[in-house]
């Protein structure tokens, strides 16, 4: 049953600045006082990605709920948690192994190749986890940050792709993907002043395929779904940031080029 | 209520985009189970500041539309007369003022009104708020006339209101504010264009100077939460010359500033699409094809 307080908090969150999700969460936690509801709410609010260092090899990796245990995060490179925890605390911690870990390792290589083709300076990772006997889950993350160049004060792209793969009643594999993109762009230009665009958008897709026991087959199917969702979200964000804003501004103030006040613009 | 909880509620109200305050109050009310939080002084202040921040539009009982501005704030007069004692004996209880009620003036309409930031009720206090100096009042009225004509010709019907306030007698400072609220919540979007111009002009002279700012804020919330904020300051004064009527010349100069600004945005949109969006994520790899997931060199 949908919890009303959590649903309303999520609705309220969508009316708050997408540029400051951590602050939104703190404020929402003040009014969603029940701890269980708070936890659920926090889990359901997508947060921008943060990086952490794997101190054993010096490489950065991305944090998310699926590689977290308490205050430590598991590196996909070395399969170890950082900051390094005490032995006793980690008895419950999850370490993928066997087929799941193999898939995870391959997925990290694939997403790195993929993201180098689409992004200027990406950090990307994948984390696989157990769900049910007949399935598994995976989370692919990509973080791309623009360098401050002429006029760009800040530019960031964060993708979170959350998969669940389950065998369904007819013996096929169903792949469910929820993709969320955060985008931030802050520009300062002479003529137009200061621009800040911030936003998140989400797309959910589902596909069913003949059952597979090969990790590589799962990875290819998931990769194609991810790419398709990302393209959709990228196009949507572009059209909203530019197209929609242009429409809102140009139908509010009717600039001479668009005709008189009587002109109706779609 | 705890300090941190109050601050959280203030934050929600401060960050509410144009036209969405009501939904935010409803969401909060559903979560906490009641709307008692609205009674708190800090929250009442936040509600009031929201009205001013967005140059909110209010409608008087007779249908006249007015704008709420910070410059329009006035002291609240006693709103409830003390109860008359039956036999004229004993002490009169002190007069009450409603904590939700604030007084404003919209000088363009020569009206003083009260606004209840909780119920939304608007009442007229005085509808003859004219400037004591005839020449200044006359000039102000001409500015209002030109401004209203400008708005009618350049902004979408029913979205935009303007207001004017003036200071000085010979050397005038006029504050001209334009509030455009372009909302379509059924289709999950809304936006505001707010212009705040300051004009200095000596009555009878042939020149004037304009400074000011334009603030634009759009919100799109169909499948997510996308906000677009544009802030432009015109700090270096734009000098103008009177050609015929001073008020008309001033509004014409404002028209030109706003027009040029809107045109400059076209280039910005192209820059975002062609340049920045591409750097954030290309539409396609430079190979021109999708990634070949099955042909990874590591598989």
Image (cartoon, coloured by chain):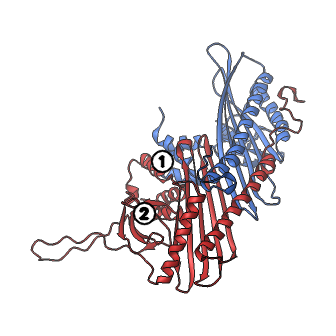
Chain colours: A blue, B red
> Dot 2 corresponds to which residue?
B44
Can you tell which of label 2 and label 1 is closer to the viewer? 2
Look at the image and tell me in which quarter the N terminus of chain B lies.
bottom left
| Side of A131 where B76 appears, left or right | left
In which quadrant of the rendered view does residue A202 lie? top right
Q: Are marks 2 and 1 in contact (CB under 8 Å)?
A: no
Q: Estimate the x, y position of residue B8 in percent, counting from the top left.
A: 51, 57
Q: Estimate the x, y position of residue A141 in percent, counting from the top left.
A: 73, 40
> Dot 1 corresponds to which residue?
A32
| Side of B211 where A4 appears, left or right | left
Q: Is residue A212 visible?
A: yes
Look at the image and tell me in which quarter the C terminus of chain B lies.
top right
Q: Residue furthest bottom?
A: B170
Q: Residues within 10 Å of mark 2 (few under 14, many from 20)?
A: many
| Side of B67 where A257 appears, left or right | right
Note whether B277 is above or below A78 in the view shown. below
Residue drawn at the location 52% of the way across and 50% of the way down: A28
Q: Chain of mark 1?
A: A
Q: Chain of mark 2?
A: B
Residue B37 or B70: which is nearer the viewer? B70
Give the spatial CA distance, label 2 vs label 1: 22 Å
Q: Secondary structure at mark 1?
A: loop
| Side of B25 where B252 appears, left or right | right
Residue drawn at the location 48% of the way across and 51% of the way down: B24
Residue B37 or A82: which is nearer the viewer? B37
In which quadrant of the rendered view does residue B291 lie? top right
Q: Estimate the x, y position of residue A157 in percent, counting from the top left.
A: 74, 47
Residue B224 or B251: which is nearer the viewer? B251
Q: Residue A95's mark?
A: none
Q: Residue furthest left?
A: B87
């Amino acid at each position: 049953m949908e919890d009303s307080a959590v649903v309303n908090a999520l609705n309220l969150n969508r009316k708050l600045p997408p540029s400051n999700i951590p602050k939104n969460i703190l404020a929402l936690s003040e009014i969603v006082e029940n701890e269980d509801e708070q936890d659920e709410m926090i889990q359901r609010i997508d947060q921008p990605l943060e990086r952490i260092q794997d101190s054993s090899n010096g490489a950065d990796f991305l944090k998310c709920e699926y590689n977290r245990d308490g205050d430590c995060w598991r590196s996909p490179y070395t399969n170890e948690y950082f900051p390094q925890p005490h032995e006793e605390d980690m008895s419950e911690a999850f370490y993928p192994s066997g087929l799941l870990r193999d898939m995870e390792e391959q997925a990290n290589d694939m997403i790195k190749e993929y993201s180098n083709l689409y992004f200027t300076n990406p950090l990307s990772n994948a984390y696989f986890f157990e769900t049910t006997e007949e399935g598994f889950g995976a989370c692919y993350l990509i973080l791309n940050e623009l360098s401050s160049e002429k006029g760009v004060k800040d530019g960031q792209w964060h993708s979170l792709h959350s998969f669940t793969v389950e065998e369904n009643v007819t013996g096929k594999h169903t792949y469910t993907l929820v993709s969320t993109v955060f985008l931030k762009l802050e520009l300062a230009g002479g003529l137009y002043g200061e621009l800040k665009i911030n936003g998140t958008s989400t797309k959910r897709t589902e596909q069913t395929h003949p059952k597979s026991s090969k990790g590589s087959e799962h990875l290819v199917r998931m990769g194609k779904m991810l790419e398709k969702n990302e393209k959709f979200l990228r196009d949507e964000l572009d059209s909203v940031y530019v197209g929609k804003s242009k429409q809102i501004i140009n139908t509010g103030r009717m600039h001479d080029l668009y005709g008189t006040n009587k002109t109706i613009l779609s | 209520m705890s300090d941190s909880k109050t601050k959280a509620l203030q934050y929600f109200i401060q960050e509410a985009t144009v036209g969405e305050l009501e939904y935010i109050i409803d969401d909060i009310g559903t979560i906490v189970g009641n709307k008692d939080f609205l009674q708190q002084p800090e929250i009442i202040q936040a509600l009031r500041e929201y009205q001013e921040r967005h140059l909110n539009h209010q409608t008087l009982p007779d249908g006249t539309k007015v704008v709420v501005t910070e410059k329009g704030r006035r002291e609240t007069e006693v709103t409830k007369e003390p109860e008359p004692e039956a036999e004229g004996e004993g002490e009169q209880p002190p007069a009450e003022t409603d904590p939700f009620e604030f007084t404003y003036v919209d000088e363009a309409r020569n009206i003083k009104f009260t606004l209840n930031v909780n119920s939304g009720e608007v009442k007229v206090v005085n509808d003859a708020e004219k400037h004591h100096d005839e020449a200044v009042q006359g000039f102000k009225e001409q500015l209002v006339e030109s401004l209203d004509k400008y708005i009618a010709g350049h902004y979408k019907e029913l979205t935009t209101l303007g207001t004017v306030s003036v200071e000085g007698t010979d050397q005038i400072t006029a504050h001209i504010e334009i509030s455009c609220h372009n909302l379509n919540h059924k289709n999950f979007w809304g936006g505001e264009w707010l212009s705040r111009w300051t004009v200095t002009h000596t009555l009878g002279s042939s020149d004037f100077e304009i400074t000011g700012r334009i603030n634009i804020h759009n919100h799109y919330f169909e499948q997510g939460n996308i906000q677009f904020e544009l802030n432009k300051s015109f700090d270096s004064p734009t000098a103008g010359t009177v050609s015929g009527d001073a008020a008309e010349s001033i509004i014409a100069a404002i028209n030109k500033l706003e027009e040029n600004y809107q045109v400059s945005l076209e280039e910005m949109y192209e820059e975002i699409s062609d340049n920045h969006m591409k750097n954030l994520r290309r539409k396609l790899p430079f190979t021109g094809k999708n990634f070949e997931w099955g042909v990874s060199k590591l598989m």
